[in-house]
Image: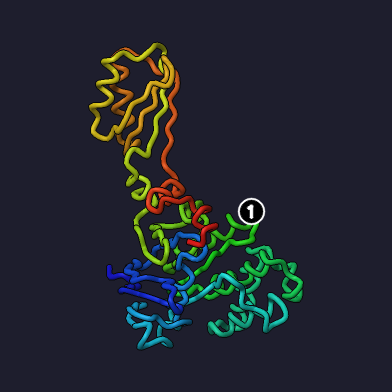
Amino acid sequence: MAPIIRITDLTKKFGNVTAVDHLNLEVEEGEILGLLGPNGAGKTTTILMLATVIRPTDGTATVGEYDIRKNPEKVRGLLGIAFQEPKMLWVSTPWDIVNWHAKVCGLSTEERKRRVKEVLESLEMWEARHRNVHALSGGMRKRVEMAKVLIQRPKIAIVDEPTAQIDIVGKHRIWNMLTELRDEGSTIILATNELYEADVLSDRVGIIHRGKMLVCDTPKKLKDSILGGDIIDIQLEEAASPDIFQELKKFKDVVDVLQLKPFNLRIYLNKVEEVIPKIVNMLTKKDSPIVSLRMTEPSLDDVFVHYTGLTIEEAQKSGE
């Protein structure tokens, strides 16, 4: 299947500052692609170029069949966008915003009434539907911005920080709705600085740092790319013999073995889910009973540090 979006050397400069630096990326139809990076990394600038809100300095992208430079109106016809900062100050209430957006999407009167109620209820905004937008909290405004995409059900949805300022229950509700939107056939680009959000939602994650795409793959493959990133802590009934140490070090994906206490081993390895049955089998054959075993896999936090040298919080503070 051909990618639905192809990005080729996409670049944007603001004066002497390069916000996006020769970005190359393909987005597959029907996937959720997470763009992960701190504020200022280039995520929002990238999606604003894809949405034809700003023009690239260099390079281009095709969205569907259309080039963002040559056919911006055709591109916009394929997209639904939830901006990082809600765009709603020109109308008075959440109902007005979502109902107007449903009209623009061409929904019939009956379907519009049904869908507007359905989406506002699912976002827990029904009781506030007639409140003035100026009286809404930042999180409530963000929900209304998300409602625009959810009611449209576009071919391609672009969502920028979809759960910023939203409580944990609301986050899970929006994550479920985005997953359902993907399952109904939409392709979704998710720009986020929340590592857990990128992990749970994305089919693939691209890490953007200083305007460059450092790596893009499935969350699992990104975690597996960290050499020795998986950890197994094993407590044995008796101290491990030198023979057991040698056997453990022979496994292809084992990077290091440490003896923390006489009966406790820590093993650094790759692909823990593939290696652990072999380790358990070996210890059983060596008549070395296991008291307890705990596995720890890398997180996207570890992946981000691995590729950037910074935690996402450190990158955020330094403006990188």
Task: Decide if residue 94 is in sight here.
Answer: yes
State the residue at coordinates (36%, 63%): 213
State the residue at coordinates (51%, 58%): 318
Nearest to the observer: residue 24 or residue 308: 308
* 117 horizontally vs 245: left or right: right
* 182 horizontally vs 271: left or right: right
Q: Position of residue 282 (x, y in %)?
A: 28, 21
Q: For the N terminus, which image quadrant? A: bottom left
User: What amino acid type should be assigned to the residue bearing mark 1?
Assistant: Val
Q: Position of residue 179 (x, y in %)?
A: 48, 60
Quarter of the image where one finds residue 246? top left
Q: Position of residue 144 (x, y in %)?
A: 63, 71
* SS at mark 1 in the image: helix
Q: Position of residue 42 (x, y in %)?
A: 45, 68
State the residue at coordinates (38%, 21%): 259
State the residue at coordinates (63%, 68%): 142
Nearest to the observer: residue 110 or residue 6: 6
Quarter of the image where one finds residue 251? top left
Q: How was this image coloured?
A: rainbow
Q: How many marks?
A: 1
Nearest to the observer: residue 2 or residue 85: 85
CA neighbours of label 1 inside 10 A, class few (<14), some (14 to 19), many (20+) = few
Nearest to the observer: residue 111 or residue 186: 186
Q: Is residue 134 above or below residue 121?
A: below
Task: Decide if residue 32 is in sight here.
Answer: no
Where is mark 1, residue-wise? Answer: 169
Quarter of the image where one finds residue 47? bottom left
